[in-house]
Image (cartoon, rainbow, N blue to C red):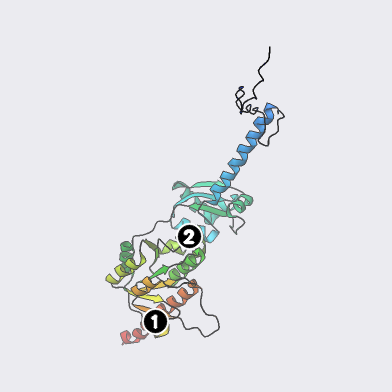
Amino acid sequence: MSRRPAAAPGRDGSDRPGRKPPRPVWESDRGTSQPRNFGDVLEARYRATESLGNELHESEEASLDLIYGRHTLVAALESDRQLNRIWVTPRLRYDPRFHTLLQKAKSNGAVIDEVDNRRLDQLTHGATHQGIVAQVAPYGYLELGDLIAQAKAATEQPVLVAVDGITDPHNLGAIIRTAEALGAQGIVIPQRRSVGVTSTVMKVAAGALENLAIARVVNLGRALEELKAEGFWIYGTDAEAGQSINTVTFHRATVLVVGSEGDGLNMLTQRSCDVLVSIPLRGKTASLNASVAAGMALYEVYRQRWTNTLSLSPAIAK
């Protein structure tokens, strides 16, 4: 009596041809067929979970919008800026300059964590934090109409700065700091092709954001037309085609539009400007950093106003 040959074992452990038996539960992902102690399996799973948790924790920290440094934090605390969490060294927490402000922030909902400098180094990736770091709530932008009304209420000669294509947060922070220091009433930034107010912008601005309003607009060209309708004159900076800035008389309500160092103002923005101005350069350097150009142009705007004020003073006295 002949026997029928046995079928090759299948993948699912059956006798169906072409299938292999299932891999034992103790078999590792690298293909070893040696069984391991069940405790080792649990330990490996725990370590994998712990590693994943650490990666997620580090990723979460990297996504936090953090500000740090004593001057920046004092300005934020004094202005009642919404802070979600504050990490501070025990020594600084009870410093007279910070203790009352931190207690106020805590009463407003901020979580206060006392940590050592190693933790602050980790949060800031080794930056100079001076013993205190905070996670800020998203920046609250004004509507353009509210910014215009606020600027006009502050002075008869309001000055606003609009930025076009400024994608470097350090440049935007420096522009904000200079604008506030010279007395401007606000900044206008577009949603596209420009950086928003980030923690880096806040750090570079060094507290100026607590005293300067910012509007973010969908379309910069339409925003400039709205500003014209409200009586503002629009002056765009252009390194090549503009009139020398020292020959231009700036009107009472002024908007200074600053473009990026590489591309300058785009054509649509240029067409929305009443006057294009340039800063005369006598050296071999062909262009200026955007924040430096903004500072020089703003200074000329205010220099004219200070000069006019001084020249009017003797006449008023007579």
Q: How many marks?
A: 2
Alpha carbons under labels 2 and 1: distance apart? 31 Å
Q: Residue at x 37, y 74 (%)?
A: 270
Give the secondary structure at mark 2.
Answer: helix
Residue 7 in the image: x percent, y percent?
64, 22
Q: Residues within 10 Å of mark 2 (few under 14, many from 20)?
A: some
Q: Residues within 10 Å of mark 1 (few under 14, many from 20)?
A: some
Say what amino acid the circle numbered 1 marks.
Gln
Q: Determine the residue located farthest toward the right in the rendered image.
A: 34
Query: Which numbered dot is residue 237?
Result: none
Q: Determine the residue located farthest toward the top in the rendered image.
A: 1
Residue 79 in the image: x percent, y percent?
43, 58
Residue 188 in the image: x percent, y percent?
38, 65
Judge by depth and name the residue closer to the eye, 261 or 250. Answer: 261
Say what amino acid the circle numbered 2 marks.
Ala
Q: Residue at x 37, y 62 (%)?
A: 215
Give the secondary structure at mark 1.
Answer: helix
Q: Quadrant of residue 300?
A: bottom left
Residue 157 visible in the current orientation = no
Residue 93 in the image: x percent, y percent?
56, 51
Judge by depth and name the residue closer to the eye, 161 or 299. Answer: 161
Q: Quadrant of residue 44?
A: top right
Which residue in the protein does label 1 denote?
304
Which residue in the protein does label 2 denote?
75
Judge by depth and name the residue closer to the eye, 175 or 5. Answer: 5
> Which of the two discs, 2 and 1, labels the residue nearer the N terminus?
2
For discs 2 and 1, the disc positioned in front in the rendered view: 1
